[in-house]
Amino acid sequence: MKIKHEWHKDFFKNSFYNPASPAAVTKAPEEARFVLKQLKLKKGAKLLDLCCGPGRHAVEFAKKGLAVTGYDFSGEYLREAARRAKKKKAALRLIRGDMRQLKFKDEFDAVVNLFTSFGYFQNFPDDLKALKGAARALKSGGRFMLDTMNGEFVRKKFHPRSWTRMPDGSYRLDETVYKKDGIVVAWTFLKAGKKPVSRLFFIRLYSRKTLSAALKKAGLTPLKFWGSFQGALLSDKRNRLIALAQKP
Ligand SMILES: C[S@@+](CC[C@H](N)C(=O)[O-])C[C@H]1O[C@@H](n2cnc3c(N)ncnc32)[C@H](O)[C@@H]1O
């Protein structure tokens, strides 16, 4: 499967995929509660939701009294985040940009990157740029939480082909191959009476060991890891890899 270098530019569009599915929106308050418990922030603390997408966590953080900045590459998703914030009477500062080009310095008490919004670049130095930017954006002592796919789970449960029934009755076909240190996945949406639509994405497969090493390279100290937003232990039987790190 041949994937474009900057595949994310075609993938994150409402016409193809929106991360704020009804199921994902329902889970957001519980996920946000877990994140905030670990970040230990006071009211008014400054939080950066890096790759905030349509803002389903960002509005929850703002409702808890934090000063939230949402940052994302997709203008469509940011507009949706603004609409969601207005509806929920939550204040959000929203900024459009690439996660490899963060300009903030010593500004935030916490940075979060949630729902597999990391590991997208086929060259590791690009992933590192994003982590270094997050580290730079933090104040000294500030905390960073990252939630991504658990690479050890994916390797153990590797399925080259699988089908998912979507809530509207249509189907999604997932075809996966290993590439470099990650996977390339082709998602094809099949809807009755419509032409099938496909897009590819790349995810670097991180384990606790490789993510710890990357965090340290970026100047962050890994503190703790989990395998779920319910606080379960990290395990190759769980599909999430959730890391908490701190800027010295
Ligand atoms: C899986 S979505 C998750 C969105 C959000 N965190 C959530 O939980 O709903 C990944 C997000 O990363 C954003 N993204 C992808 N590549 C990016 C890049 N290079 N720079 C900034 N944002 C990017 C996408 O636009 C999308 O909103």
Image (cartoon, rainbow, N blue to C red):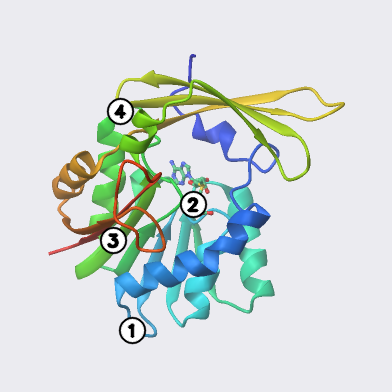
**Residue 244 seen:** yes
Q: Amino acid at mark 1?
A: Lys
In this view, the residue farthest toward the bottom is 43
Q: Position of residue 172 (x, y in %)?
A: 66, 31
- Residue 182 drawn above or below residue 38: above
Q: Amino acid at mark 2?
A: Asp
The quarter of the picture where residue 247 lies is bottom left
How far is the residue under mark 1 from the one under mark 2? 25 Å
Task: Determine whether the residue tagged by mark 3 lies in a helix, strand or loop.
Answer: strand
The quarter of the picture where residue 100 lies is top left
How many other residues sit within 10 Å of disc 3, few (<14), some (14-19) or many (≥20)?
many
- Where does label 4 land, which residue? 123
Q: Nearer the viewer, residue 168 or 235?
A: 235
Q: Position of residue 242 (x, y in %)?
A: 33, 54
- Where does label 2 land, which residue? 72
- Where does label 1 land, which residue? 42
In this view, the residue farthest toward the front is 237
Task: Return the mark for residue 28.
Answer: none
How far is the residue under mark 3 from the one under mark 1? 15 Å
Label 1 or label 4, whichever lies nearer to me, is 1
